Image (spheres, grey):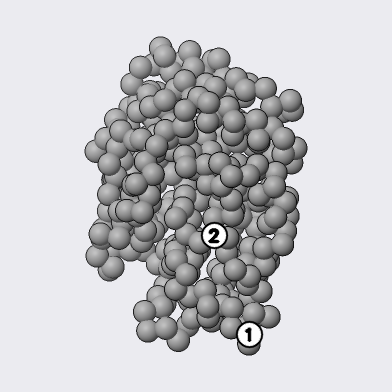
Amino acid sequence: MVFDSVGLVLTDDCNARCKMCCAGKPELQEQHHTLTHQELTAVLSQIKEVRSITYVGITGGEPMMHPDLVQAVCDYDFGRPMRISLKTNGFWGRDPKKASSFLTRNSQRIKYISFSYDEFHCKYVDLNSIKTLIDLAWNKGIPTDIVGCFLKDSMSAGTVLDMLGEHAYRCNFLYQPVMRTGLATNFDEERFIRPYRFGKEKLPCSVALKHTLLINTALQVYPCCSQVVEGTILRIGDLTVEPLSKVISRTKHNKLLVSLFTKGLTPFLDVISDEADCPSEFSTPCEACEYLFRDTRFFNQFRNEDRVEKVGVSAPR
């Protein structure tokens, strides 16, 4: 199994307190942390050793609360071309001079910037800051997008596009239903948008196409680009214990991951379909994955001898 990209969580700190944030899981609050420069350098050196990795996605929390760490990633010598993306709420666009200087310095390394904006983020980030950054990035040839998260009764995607005005033509716009995880578990069930209906929709794992790892601030490794999986039994390694190369090498023997990547989530949902509280609808495949693997509740069912062949599961580490 070859992984070609890494999502790197530099910090759990954020200047926003969005009510739908997946990083608000109670079990993650105990490990709230920002990487030290020493930790970051150690992680980057391990990424360098894995030659298949050619893409690093910087994320958080809000990574630009620690621009020195972001700059350290951009300046690091990986010994090969490395594409870098930045996930941010865009608050730093409030200082156009500093923002322009940062983007000018890193225009050859940062290949993509993704902003978050919707009803939840607008309470903390001025849209004009994001517009400023879209313009600056556009002028420097850096593509951008805006990801919006939505409930049935929240600000609509159309409203966000109207607010963007002509800037909507300078960036991509991605529509994301709010997932019932993290702080969003406090929302009433009827508010969620559920486009995936169990039994009617196939639920593929997007990592099967992206082949992405996630390294969080506790230096735990997950086989996914989504932070929704943090705290689940899908953790595949710990960089305080073993190197990234060894973690990756071991994944080819992980039957659970092979099943997920090749067959998707549907076979696992089939196994537990008789459970009284098994949801009939999901916002995204990622939400279904977090439901299945948030703990070991269903794991023994997956391992039953008459079902192992169906989903190919071995014990998690």
Report the front residue among 67 and 35. 35
Disc assigned to residue 305: 1
Image location of residue 316, percent across then percent down:
57, 64
Q: Secondary structure at mark 1?
A: helix
Relative horizontal placement of residue 13, taking residue 72 as reference (left or right): left
Residue 205 appears in the figure = yes
Q: Quadrant of the C terminus?
A: bottom right
Q: Residue at x 47, y 42 (%)?
A: 218
Question: Within 10 angstroms of label 1, few (less than 14), some, or many (20 or more) residues?
Answer: few
**Are the residues tagged 1 and 2 within 8 Å (C-beta)?**
no
Q: Residue at x 25, y 59 (%)?
A: 186
Residue 114 appears in the figure = no
Report the front residue among 47 and 7. 47
Residue type at mark 2?
A: Leu
Relative horizontal placement of residue 63, taking residue 83 as reference (left or right): left
Residue type at mark 1?
A: Glu
Q: Is residue 270 positioned above or below 14 on the image? A: below
Q: Quadrant of the N terminus?
A: bottom right
Question: Within 10 angstroms of label 2, few (less than 14), some, or many (20 or more) residues?
Answer: many
- In which quarter of the view is residue 261 placed? bottom right
Q: Residue at x 56, y 33 (%)?
A: 85
Residue identified by numbered label 2: 234
Image location of residue 124, percent across then percent down:
27, 35
Q: Residue at x 69, y 32 (%)?
A: 48
Relative horizontal placement of residue 155, taking residue 307 as reference (left or right): left
Report the front residue among 30 and 183. 30
Image location of residue 217, percent across then percent down:
47, 39
Distance in Å between CA atoms under marks 1 and 2 = 21 Å
- In which quarter of the view is residue 76 placed? top right
Q: Earlier in the sequence, mark 1 or mark 2?
A: 2
Report the front residue among 263 and 139. 263
Q: Secondary structure at mark 2?
A: loop
